[in-house]
Image (tube, rainbow, N blue to C red):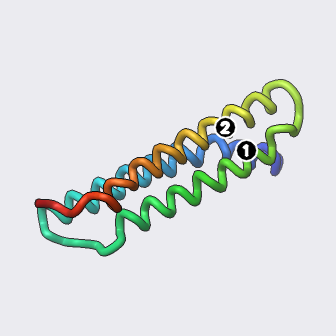
């Protein structure tokens, strides 16, 4: 696998993996806070920030590779850029309740 293929694979795989990490980490932290009263300060925000950084890096990688090659490689890099932008939006929207909503009642 060449470095160009590895960058394209990262741009395709990283955004959904980052979103999945953010979703599961926030679910774990919120369930611990509500059920066991174990609070991790800024835990949900840190998980969201880490996932957003990974998705942003994948978006930058995909945008940098969008004009490399022809045919399938060009299509995959543009599709990866679109998917990275959508997953980045999902990560940001998934992080908003941790910032805007108070803890468990």
> Regarding mark 1 in the picture, which secondary structure is present there?
helix
Horizontal relation, residue 46 to residue 80: left or right: left
- Which badge, 2 or 1, is on the more N-terminal residue? 1
Please tell me in which quadrant of the rendered image residue 73 appears. Answer: top right
- Give the residue number, with chain letter if any, for mark 1: 62
- Give the residue number, with chain letter if any, for mark 2: 80
Measured as percent of width and height from the top left, residue 60 is found at: 71, 51
Please tell me in which quadrant of the rendered image residue 70 appears. Answer: top right
| Image height of 68 relative to 102, above or below | above
Measured as percent of width and height from the top left, residue 100 is found at: 31, 59
Please identify the quadrant where the N terminus is shown: top right
Q: Which of 102 and 10 is in front in this view?
A: 102
Measured as percent of width and height from the top left, residue 75 is found at: 76, 28
| Circle 2 residues within 10 Å: few <14, some 14–19, many ≥20 | many
Please identify the quadrant where the C terminus is shown: bottom left
Measured as percent of width and height from the top left, residue 30 is found at: 24, 59
Most extreme residue toward the front, as rendered? 100
Q: How many marks?
A: 2
> Regarding mark 2 in the picture, which secondary structure is present there?
helix
| Circle 1 residues within 10 Å: few <14, some 14–19, many ≥20 | many
Task: Tell me how far mark 2 sits from mark 1, CA to CA.
Answer: 6 Å
Most extreme residue toward the top, as rendered? 71
Q: Nearer the viewer, residue 17 or 96?
A: 96
Identify the residue at image location x=57%, y=60%: 53
Identify the residue at image location x=28%, y=62%: 29
Most extreme residue toward the bottom, as rendered? 41
Horizontal relation, residue 6 to residue 83: left or right: right
Identify the residue at image location x=38%, y=50%: 23
Asked whether the residues under the numbered discs 2 and 1 touch, taking CB atoms below 8 Å apart as contact, a structural biologist would say: yes
Which disc number belongs to residue 12? none
| Image height of 90 relative to 97, above or below | above
């Amino acid at each position: 696998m060449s470095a160009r293929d590895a960058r394209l694979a990262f741009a395709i795989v990283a955004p959904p993996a980052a979103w999945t990490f953010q979703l599961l980490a926030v679910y774990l932290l919120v369930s611990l806070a509500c059920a066991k009263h174990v609070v991790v300060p800024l835990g949900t925000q840190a998980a969201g920030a880490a996932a957003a950084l990974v998705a942003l890096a994948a978006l930058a990688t995909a945008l940098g590779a969008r004009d490399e090659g022809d045919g399938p490689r060009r299509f995959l890099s543009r599709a990866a850029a679109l998917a990275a932008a959508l997953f980045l939006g999902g990560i940001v929207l998934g992080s908003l309740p941790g910032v805007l909503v108070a803890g468990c009642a």
